[in-house]
Image (spheres, grey):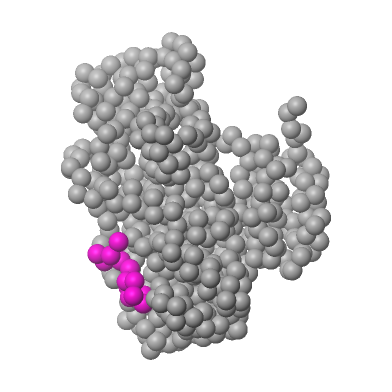
Amino acid sequence: MNPFNYSRRLSSTVYIGNAPMGGDNPVRIQSMANVSTMDTEVAVAQAIRMIEAGAEYVRFTAQGEREARNMGRIRKALRDKGYATPLVADIHFNAAVADIAAREVEKVRINPGNYAPTPELIRRRFASLLRICRENRTAIRIGVNHGSLSERIMNRYGDTPEGMVASCMEFLEICREEDFADVVISIKASNTVVMVKTVRLLASEMDREGMNFPLHLGVTEAGDGEDGRVKSAVGIGALLADGLGDTIRVSLSEDPEKELSVARALTEYIREREGHNRIDAPQAVNHTAMERRLSRSAGRIGGSRPPVVLMPDFREDYPGVKFVHVTLDSLTDETVSLLSEDASSVAILSSNHLNPVGEMRAAIHRLMNAGCNAPVILSRSYGEDDPESLTVKASADFGALLLDGFGDGLMMHNKGAAKVDMEHLLLGILQAARLRITRAEYISCPGCGRTLYDLQTTVARIKAVTSHLTGLRIGIMGCIVNGPGEMADAHYGYVGAGPGKISLYKAKQCVRKNIPEDEAVERLVQLIKDGGDWKDCNP
């Protein structure tokens, strides 16, 4: 992959109903229902809302055989109403349910972490599912989640990107042996750094093995509001900018149809880069290594400090610092020498190229090749009238570069009518990239038919009483399926344990079980206080 010039990775075509994925097809967008799969009328109504908002695939949870069979009824009802959008069954824990769902819908998602404990049993069980899928022309998504790796993989690799890739490749080898080609892969995490590193690693591993299966991208448990949109765009945007990804799902703790405008804005923005003017520059480092560029200090910028955010009057805050505005074209030998020799200088790097990420990468590689370690502020200018579009574009651009390991600060302007709190947005991007922590973080799932309480209301209630706890990570999970695993790096967790019942976690350990829902938020606050992590709001 060339880090400077955008082109999509050429993947194989997977046939999923009337919406094939990969190959020359556009990046598909999708969402997942959060209503009961057994309530056919409500499920059909929500699916229609998602389809009309742009969903090209609609996913439902099928936690049991009844739900898997009822997806056939949902599918028929949608077809009777004139909607041919493919349905996807989401399977966890019970592999036998996938056998049933494969006969009812166009695609089945399975989790390798839920399969048999030995390679021999996995091969036998999974090969049986592939035969059913072949007979019914059903595609498969192999969906590896950071929080639900099998015990065997965990014992060998730990909870690592390498373990996630190994889990995925084990199943892909079986697909190749069985000559089954209608396979899509997802490899997700709620941590954007882990998610991007793992997908890049998987793509490289598939290349080495001569595999070109399409990729499904997503950041799990991204949250809601601006933070959810930022986190999703940082992770997904970085990979789309690499040319990776054939379908995306933005996971927000909101109504599923609201995910689709974010997904559409993101894919359309990256697609604009197709056919851009070529960017020529020598490569200094392998950007997939994601190692932080070491810069010198200039005042309070650079060195080992976290990246800063520059606002319009920034010069007053950094006396003695010499800011030099540069682009790739203006980085002449003379300019590079100035930045290298003047220890007070800081580069403000911008781009008006159709592929701004590629051009800004090339500029930083040029500095690195010249041995110049001047701090670099990443600067972007937009002309957006829609706040969501501005949020998505800024997060995708800055996120890709920050995850590469580039940038000692951020700066942005918007010439359009969109009004956002620029400082809050940029600090949110830095937090999503795990580079600077300035607020509480919520690892909250989007909800599905397994969710055991009103997720959106609960997220709002928890945020209302904990948002002042800077640096605290709180997991808010609808059920036990991904709960403890996906919130593994949360300090505290709130997980649906049964109808009207909540379990509370401290780190990975369940410390309070089956608490009545109406007491659970208050008990969570008390748990945080007992753990010594509570601070009262500033007066």
Q: Position of residue 410 (x, y in %)?
A: 43, 30
| Residue 421 is a magenta residue | no
Q: Quadrant of residue 345?
A: top left
Residue at the extreme front? 81
- Quadrant including the C terminus: top right
Give the vertical position of 70 relative to 164 (above or below). Answer: below
The residue under the point 47% across, 13% down is: 316
Q: Quadrant of residue 214?
A: bottom left
The residue under the point 57% across, 51% down is: 223
Residue placed most toward the observer, 26 or 341 = 26
Q: Considering the whole magenta stretch, tell me its main secondary structure.
A: loop
Image label count: 0
Residue 304 shows in this picture? no
In this picture, residue 124 sits left or right of residue 471: left
Residue placed most toward the observer, 214 or 287 = 214
The residue under the point 52% across, 38% down is: 428
Q: Position of residue 165 (x, y in %)?
A: 43, 62
Give the vertical position of 328 relative to 322 (above or below). Answer: below
Give the vertical position of 323 relative to 46 (above or below). Answer: above
Residue at the extreme top? 320
Q: Quadrant of residue 377?
A: top left
| Residue 23 is a magenta residue | yes
The stretch of residues the image draws in magenta is: 14-26
The residue under the point 75% across, 61% down is: 502
Residue placed most toward the observer, 134 or 15 = 15
Residue 16 shows in this picture? yes
Q: Position of residue 380 (x, y in %)?
A: 36, 32
In this picture, residue 388 sits left or right of residue 221: left
Q: Position of residue 352 (x, y in %)?
A: 27, 34
